[in-house]
Amino acid sequence: MAGAATQVCIGVVAPLTGRLAPLGEPLSFAVRTLTRRLLRLHNSGRTYDVRIAVRDSHSQPEGARRAVRELADDERASIVVTMAGTQVLPAAADACEELGVPCVSTTFPWQAYGYARGGDPLRTFRWTYHFAWGLDDIAAVFADLWEQLGGRQTVGCLWNDDLQGQLLRHERFGFAPVAVDRGHTLIDPGGYREPATDFGSHLARLREGGAEVITSAATAADLAQCLRQSRTVGPAPRLVTCSRWLTYPHTHTTRTREVHDELAAAKVATLVYWSPEHPYRSSLDGTGCADLARAYREETGQSWLQPLGLAHALFEVAHHALATAPDPSDRPAVARTLAKTRTETVVGTLDWTRGPTPNIALIPLAGGQWHQGAFGPRLTLVDNTRAPEVPLTGDLTPAY
């Protein structure tokens, strides 16, 4: 009967414990905040009670697969949202694809999302959808930053020997071809195993090539070790651009004081996909980016993290799909709705009808740099070439 209450469930796979737990805090905050705001869903004259069910991935691929099975079978989730983990996120998405559960994910480049799920970044899926940026977008933003130093640069590549490094080097989908096409010279001394023990041979190659810039996707600890060794053998890089872990404040991902000191001195530059300065508002309740960052700080006592906007947007997308699907309790109908989704969120417009594949919606990137503030690392927006709507808050400062 029209108007009768029916229940739908949004499932959440989150790294509540394990090595990814610090990176999963924004998703946990979004769950706590939005559970109260998503109690009711209106769809075509009917009202649905909304339940959010959370399962811990334990920061492990098998944990993510088990979490999805529980959400699909025990909780009867109509849609699953997830984020974080180069191996964990693909495992959750694959489990959703196998079980026929619509899934929305975010937090790492779309090429890695596709490649980790069968070796083809352009592969399409029926049930699983992702929003993020590309390795090519990271390369373009980093090249914008390098060029602020003055023209074309010789750049040393500190890339691991795992999936991340393989994709950065990929001749078609990677970081390298975009940077080279911009006229920059890349020196790649080969991959290293994480965690790293010595960068001596890598630094020798970079020194021989005359690289004054280093680009990387290293962990905070590995990057700090490289910088420590570079100061000893010389010369230290004028600029370091680093994605992945360095999109977070280094004080958040490690407690080691020596790491903090090295990275603070290097003034590491990184990509910016969300900040309190971004001009977007939530489609759920009109919350602005500054409002969201302030609420996070007031509740947790911690500074905002870039994934905070992404975590909030996951629920905006899930709500939009459930509110506009012909039947929010029908998983195939929800999946078909996701494929046609274009919606405004706190991270901007997400449009699955225009992505590089039908399963991808893109987010523009800006360039940022970590500066040491009174309360720890502070991310300054220093280049908005790719996202002109985002205001700059400072200038790029070389380490020397």
Image (cartoon, grey):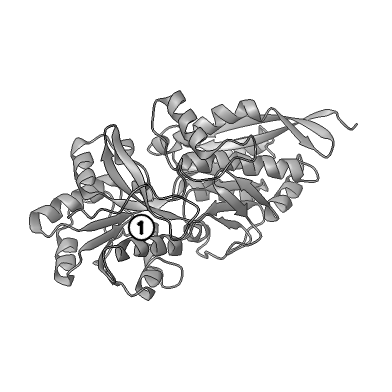
Given residues 279 and 170, the one toward you in this image is: 279
Q: Which residue, given by chain and number where applicable, does mark 1 sit on?
A: 162
Question: Residue 346: which quarter of the image?
Answer: top right
Estimate the x, y position of residue 92 in percent, counting from the top left.
54, 45
| Residue at 63% across, 55% down | 351
| Residue at 89% across, 32% down | 2
Horizontal side of 71 relative to 181 (left or right) equals right
| Residue at 33% across, 75% down | 183
Horizontal side of 110 relative to 191 (left or right) equals right
Estimate the x, y position of residue 271 in percent, counting from the top left.
39, 53
Question: Residue 24: which quarter of the image?
Answer: top left
Q: Residue lying farthest right?
A: 1
- Mark 1: secondary structure: loop
Q: Quadrant of the C terminus?
A: bottom left
Vertically, is 162 above or below 77? below
Q: Residue lying farthest left?
A: 232
Identify the amino acid type marked 1: Asp
Q: Can residue 354 be seen? A: yes
| Residue at 76% across, 48% down | 333
